[in-house]
Amino acid sequence: MASLELAENGSDGYTQDGTVDLKGKPVLRSKRGGWRACRFVVVYEVFERMAFYGISSNLFIYLTKKLHQGTVTSANNVTNWVGTVWMTPILGAYFADAVLGRYWTLVIACAIYLSGMSLLTLAVSVPRLRPPHCADPKGINCQKADKLQLGVYFAALYILAVGTGGTKPNISTIGADQFDEFDPKEKLHKLSFFNWWMFGIFLGTLFANTVLVWIQDNVGWTLGYGLPTTGLAISILIFLAGTQFYRHRIPTGSPFTRMAQVIIASLRKWKVSVPSDPKELYELDLEEYAKNKKVRIDSTPSLRFLNKACVKTTSTNPWMLCPVTQVEETKQMLRMIPILIATFIPSTMIAQINTLFVKQGTTLNRRLGGFNIPPASLAAFVTLSMLISVILYDRYFMKIIRRWTNNPRGITLLQRMGIGMILHIVIMTVASLTEKYRLSVAKDHGLVQNAGQVPRSILLLLPQFVLMGVADAFLEVAKIEFFYDQAPESMKSLGTSYSMTTLGAGNFISSFLLSTVSRITKRDGNEWIQNNLNASHLDYYYAFFAVLNVLNIIFFLIMTKLYIYKAEISDSMVVLREELGGLKSKVTDEEATTT
């Protein structure tokens, strides 16, 4: 069981989780943190997500229609960039946990982010930095972007990616840090925080996928990029306005160094036997942890080989001898890796939303009454179904289920993730069947070779977008909370970056699979993904994805069976379970009395 000794106790109103103000002083619960601080964080995220998705949602269309790149090239450029966006949080987490702290890392990253967005706006606005307008709807005879235009545009995109690397792992962590793990009421609020956090994300995304995408397609890219840049500037100002209310955590050194010390010390002492009594292992005094406001963790039998790092020898070198707590922190991060890997394939499915799903939309009738629906706007239905699903889950499903499970979350985080993964199998099956029907209509109307518009509404694609939002409500929300919750206290930013890394890996896997499948099927004379989707076999590609998801859920179930949840650092969850158990007993007694 984890132990924590702090100078302050709950009775004098100070937080007990080691959070401080920007000057490093203890903070009163009544003055800082809680939803008082989180409202700034959540509103920041609404505007920031609006800015990010204002660029990413329609990026595929800009690359194909304005820079005149092919389907596979554009899709890979999108997924490579998005993959980078979601991988850079590892660096942001390092600087936050080891050097600058979360607050200052985020502030500096925001400045980089804003400079990238500003340069991107210039790239689509200055005539010399973009190709001339082309009237050919198929883009065959259009002048492609030159090296300068591509260089400026992609430089801006990747500057933006570096900036997001510092914001993504830290903003949600800062929000979660506003709730004290040692206070049962605040712990309960934290359980709902990630649901409302995702609500804020998708609220900003909804605006981007509807209003901004429509402006980009129908008004112009200068205004379409200028608005999200302005939105980002507003989000930064909103975050800074809440500074006086935030609780902060002191940087505790590089998590990578501490983990490396444990692994290397274990390997160097691979012949050493681990004593049966954990008390014989090396550990710092409780006072040392209390002084630094850190958590001490007792030794566990899992990943027993790493316990060799804390077996006492003649050397006290940190690369030869590590405290038990340091070893257990490393174990916690390593135990999550199989779960992390299991989320790669669902993240690959998410990468299709702004690439191949959008390309499908360009082949269908986009007229709805007197309105022309931008293909990228269909992603708004992912957002809407996500918003509705999160609200229903938080307000109804979770409250009903936890009466029977006595789990404050209703179901475990891994169970929630599993439901989302099962939905991904359904999504890709539906997408494959829908595409098969679209191809049959194209064939019946003689549109295979001329790449003509298929006489079916773009709303034909609606089910796969709506189901993707429902899956996100289960998988994506639970994924963020899982990696934050299961990470050790001193490595929360790194834990949060795990949930981002999976999206990065998923996008890179998408690029690899698309290039590989396109190359192999082209060699066989029956290319699955061409610029002309009417002559392609995207239905086969989606069916292939469905099979991948089936294999992945089997792997996930095996890994969850083996996974060991970390010990709670406080009694908050125990108190909540007891309260829920008492509520359940009370309801049962009332029902019996009524009967």
Image: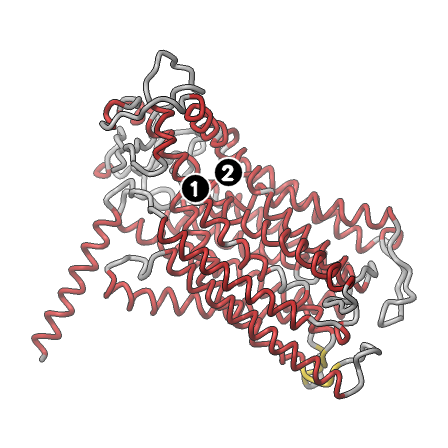
Res 154 label: none
Distance of label 2 from label 1 (alpha carbons) = 9 Å
- Protein image colouring: secondary structure
The image's mark for residue 246 is: 1
* 330 with respect to 102 (left or right): left
Q: Horizontal and vertical percent for residue 429?
A: 56, 73
> Percent from the top left, x then y, of residue 455?
73, 85
Q: Which residue is mark 2?
A: 103
Q: Quadrant of the N terminus?
A: top left
The residue carrying pointer 2 sits among few (fewer than 14), some (14 to 19) or many (20 or more) residues within 10 Å by Cα, namely many
Asked whether the beta carbons under mark 2 and mark 1 sit within 8 Å of each other, the answer is yes
Number of marks? 2
Determine whether the residue tagged by mark 1 lies in a helix, strand or loop.
Answer: loop
Q: Quadrant of residue 397?
A: bottom left
> Where residue 575 sits: x, y (%)?
21, 50
Residue 561 x/y as whole percent? 35, 53
Taking 237 as reference, is 376 above or below it? below
Residue 20 vs 407, above or below: the answer is: above
Q: Is residue 253 above or below residue 19?
A: above
Q: Amino acid at mark 1?
A: Tyr
Observer able to see residue 183: yes
Q: Give, as a three-letter code, the residue at label 2.
A: Tyr
Q: Nearer the viewer, residue 407 or 265?
A: 265
Extreme-top residue of the structure = 314
